[in-house]
Amino acid sequence: MAPVTQPVPGDRGPADSRKEAVAINGLVKGFGSQEVLKGVSLNLYEGENLAILGKSGSGKSVLIQCIVRLLDPDAGTITVLGENVETLNSDGLGELRKKIGFLFQSGALYDSMTVRENLEFPLRRIRRSLTQEQRDAKIKEVLDHVGLYEAIDKMPSQLSGGMLKRISLARTIVVDPVIMLYDEPTTGLDPVTSDEISVLINDSRKKYKTSSIIITHDIACARATADRMIMLLDGKVYLEGTFETFENSTDGAIKAFFK
């Protein structure tokens, strides 16, 4: 089936008037004989929520791992906040990563630490100039933001799945990232909690002025959060547009996501 890519600038004005937070051109990535990404090109604009859809194995998670160079591309270029990721040395890459928040599907909290300690750990590593009073204030701010300040002294084992996800989001935004990468943020959550996470994604974008890529299978999450959407199929960008572009498509591969 031929690709039906239809770039749509969305509701933020003409595409060429917006500044790029991330620009990916001709990205190729394979593992052994399996080519996962086959020349993917896309942009994330400043202040935008971009949702990326695709069936399992389509390369969505590989894509965002390449953005932060957890994986090295085989070909193509990735520019993040004006920096060519491939040309950065270890120090430069470390500085760039401090500006990027990565919310893993699992949440990835430290089981042996309290909520307070989980949030304080990245602050001590990344925001070293803060005083203890400033760290305490920042931790309170982000826990209030996710509605869980009362959980500050709890262990991760004492939290529900939805609470863990919200605390993980708080830990990610506590260092004031410029870009957020969400990997399946609502997977495994009930519909009500999933909706709460979608609201928090939008609220975090508004409060912390982030630009976000949201990897998701959850159509409700995409509907609630995305200014623009991209679908990956067979390692390529298959369709790009607003949620309405996808919802109104008559293409079988697109309609399969809306059943």
Image: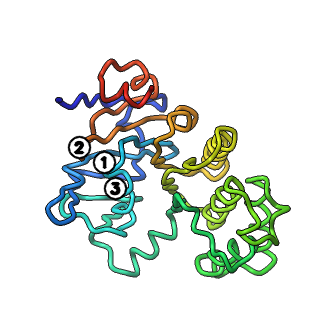
User: Judging from the image, what secondary structure is the residue with disc 2 in?
Assistant: loop
Q: Which residue is mark 1?
A: 58
Q: Assess whether mark 1 and mark 2 are in contact (beta carbons under 8 angstroms).
A: yes
Say left or right for 20 vs 202. left
Residue 69: image x %, image y %?
35, 68
Say left or right for 153 vs 209. right
Front tag of 3 and 2: 2
Mark 1 belongs to which amino acid? Ser
Say left or right for 171 vs 46. right
User: Judging from the image, what secondary structure is the residue with disc 1 in?
Assistant: loop
- In the image, 39 versus 94, the foreground residue is 39
**Mark 1 or mark 3: whose residue is earlier in sequence:** 1
Residue 232: image x %, image y %?
31, 42
Front tag of 1 and 3: 1
The residue at the point 79 percent across, 73 percent down is 136
Mark 2 and mark 1: Cα distance apart in space: 6 Å
Residue 93: image x %, image y %?
39, 74
The residue at the point 60 percent across, 81 percent down is 125
The residue at the point 55 percent across, 33 percent down is 220
Mark 3 belongs to which amino acid? Leu
User: Judging from the image, what secondary structure is the residue with disc 3 in?
Assistant: helix
Q: How dense is the environment of label 2, judged by Cα within 10 Å: few (below 14), some, or many (20 and up)?
A: some
Residue 197: image x %, image y %?
64, 46
Tell me, for residue 63, which label it has, or none.
3
Tell me, for residue 234, which label it has, or none.
2
Q: How dense is the environment of label 3, judged by Cα within 10 Å: few (below 14), some, or many (20 and up)?
A: many
Image quadrant assignment for residue 257: top left
Say left or right for 235 vs 160. left
Mark 2 belongs to which amino acid? Asp
**Mark 2 or mark 1: whose residue is earlier in sequence:** 1
Quarter of the image where the N terminus is located: top left
Mark 3 and mark 2: Cα distance apart in space: 13 Å
